[in-house]
Image: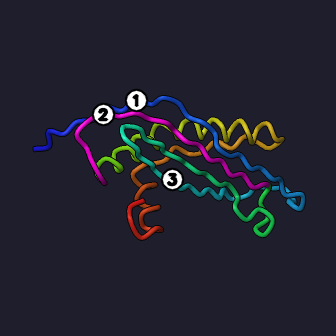
Amino acid sequence: MNNKHITLSFKRYMVNRIDFSYNPDYSGGQAKMDINFNHSVAVKDNEAQVTLRCMLFRNAKKEEKPFYLEVHMTGLFTFNGDLEGEELKHFLRKQGLTALFPYMRALITNITSSCGYPPVILPIINVNQLIEKQSAQDGSEH
């Protein structure tokens, strides 16, 4: 039986990067959504930084997409408890991404609607699948 516990406090988030470029060669019409996510976790003492990165239309010019958008967002957390090592990182990754994703969705919707495009509303994601997908791409749990 696992009697370990942890308390996690979400202090704030910050936007580290916004990179937007429109594609002047885009001919219009419906573009199939191209979304890529990745993430990282850094832990020091009882503080953690969870960073979520999102890219829309990575190859906008080459693939006839309307624009390129990359956003990096970091959540700052404090924690106390019994978890350590990979178990702690897994917990922080899962909870941190769950906390950050609504802010990322809102920011991307605001950016795209403010740039003269129909607003992009990211689909709700399964954080566990996002973690598993990046782990498979990295060859290890990140």
Residue under numbered circle 1: 9
Q: Name the residue under label 3.
A: 39
Q: Which label's residue is closer to the chain start, 1 or 2? A: 1
Give the numbered dot on residue 80: 2
Asked if disc 1 and disc 2 are in contact, CB closer than 8 Å, the reply is no
Front in this rendered view, residue 49 or 111: 49
Image location of residue 120, percent across then percent down: 68, 44
**With 17 as the anchor, is 36 left or right in this view?**
left
Q: What stretch is highlighted in magenta?
A: 67-86
Q: Which residue is drawn at 67% across and 41% down?
A: 108
Spatial CA distance of label 3 from label 1 is 19 Å
- Helix, strand or loop at mark 1: strand
Query: Residue at the location (42% across, 67% down)?
Result: 136
Quadrant in the picture for the C terminus: bottom left
First of labels 2, 3 by sequence position: 3
Question: What residue type is disc 2 on?
Answer: Asn
